[in-house]
Image (tube, grey):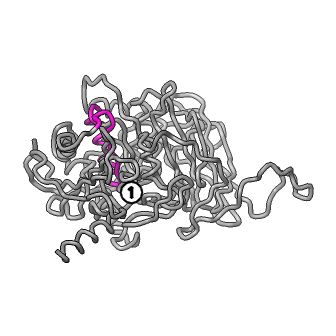
Amino acid sequence: MRHLAIITATIVALAGTAAAGTLEQVTGFGSNPGALAMWRYRPTTPAANAPLVVFMHGCSQSHTDAAAVGWTQLADQYGFYVVFPEQATANNPIKCFNWAGEYGDVANLTRGQGENLSVKQMVDKMKADFAIDAARVYVAGFSAGAGFTSVMLATWPDVFAGGAIMSGLPFRCATTVNGAYACQQLNTHPELKHTPAEWGDLVRNAFPGYAGARPRVVIFHGTTDSTVSPDNQVELIDQWTNVGGADQTADETATVSGHERTRYKNGATVVVESWRLVSMGHAVAMGNDPEHACAPAGTYTESRNLCAAYRAAQFFNLTGGVVEPPMDAGVIDAPMGGVDAGPVDAGVGPDASAPPIDAAVPGAPTVRLTAPADGAEVSGAVTLSADASAGDGVARVEFKIDGVLKGSDGTAPYTYRWQTANVDDGEHTIEAVVYDRFEVSATDGITVVVAAATGNPGDPSTVDPIPCGCRAETGGGAVGMLGVSLLVLGLVRRRRARA
């Protein structure tokens, strides 16, 4: 009995929970064609007709890593259940959910097959065992789990009312090995980007004929994520706003703990919410959120003064409604490289001794678009280039087309490949915005004219430059960059029964 108590305490500690609810494995939940493990968390006091959240881990992680980002504490506080699907090394050596299929086999991306059916069967098991509100079932995930969250939202819109995509990728960005690597580095693969309508059609075609309500989606992505390019966040916004019946112009913008939150509405309903997490890499945001602190725990987390799990639960309306946080000066936690900023001006008038607001400040960031030329006629894949400098160091240069963020680059020379086939012919504005490490910015803009492309099939800009799907880089933490790429990619050849 003493050994049993120690094991139970260890599981609870790894899950980052108070000694209250129960984290347990469940077997016999269905045919399980994806050969996944099911773990569930039963809160201390479940709400009557309780909601359910499914959260999927990233590669190399487990259900304990998934639980450690705050979902179990939230479940105890608000009375909802949580399911943590877990990948097995027998299926995938680094335990990735297969968001891009398996070597061209798209069963996992097809409704009612492979891993997506296994996850859906876990939901069915929860409904059979507990009083679950079928209208309040949600799915979320990080990294490869976030990529598979896109899969679940597309294939089972009749099951999930909403989803949270943390450092993830659009549905069907890729179905091959090479394509998956390219999607992870989408900033250098404009040929894989689509118009909002094209992205939306990929989702709609996952369940042809479905005419019901579509899930609402919240997206979290770090601005310095080198494993999954932040360009994926832009494409995710395009995909899910189109699915949700909204345009791609934000209806609301706010700053919370130094991070930008934008909301996109269809009528009065927020169908997409997006969080651009300043200076965060490939991770789940945690820390001293002004509304709900969650201490960083587990792998792939960063202290950023924002609790992503709480913000997702808030978006799902699991916390008693969305509370508008106070505007602030953008504080991010210093231990991970952020800078603690002072409080916002509380209404004090300007300092008479200060220079005019438009005066040049020594060391202030500067940026200049160097290509293409202002007024140029462009077509096909166009490389945008900018020179930038800052006294405190350039954090990144962002590139916007017609006011919409399309990509960023944190290393000089600052460039972005723009695929003009995704926009209408005619005049368009291009902006380059430089940010220093204190998030002070400067902007330069030009106007170009997009002409119809000639469609040269031999144009190397349309060819995937990663022909073998492998890249032997070093760095990137304990597993190296190749390992990190594989963590998200999660493609291995295996044979298993499918429904």
Left or right of 433 on screen, residue 409: left
Q: Position of residue 149 (x, y in %)?
A: 32, 45
| Residue corresponding to mark 1 | 73
Q: Which residues are magenta?
A: 133-159
How far across and down, in percent of the image, does residue 192 sit? 38, 43
Quarter that holds the C terminus: top left
Q: Is residue 284 left or right of residue 43?
A: right
Which amino acid type is marked by label 1? Gln
Q: Is residue 142 magenta?
A: yes
Indicate yes or no whether the magenta region holds residue 13.
no
Q: Which residue appears farthest toward the left when viewing the image? A: 497
Q: Residues within 10 Å of mark 1 (few under 14, many from 20)?
A: many
In this rendering, is residue 124 above or below 77? above
297 with respect to 112 (left or right): right
Task: Kindly indicate the quadrant of the structure image that contains residue 352.
Answer: bottom right
Which image quarter holds the N terminus? Answer: bottom left
Q: Nearer the viewer, residue 408 or 253?
A: 253
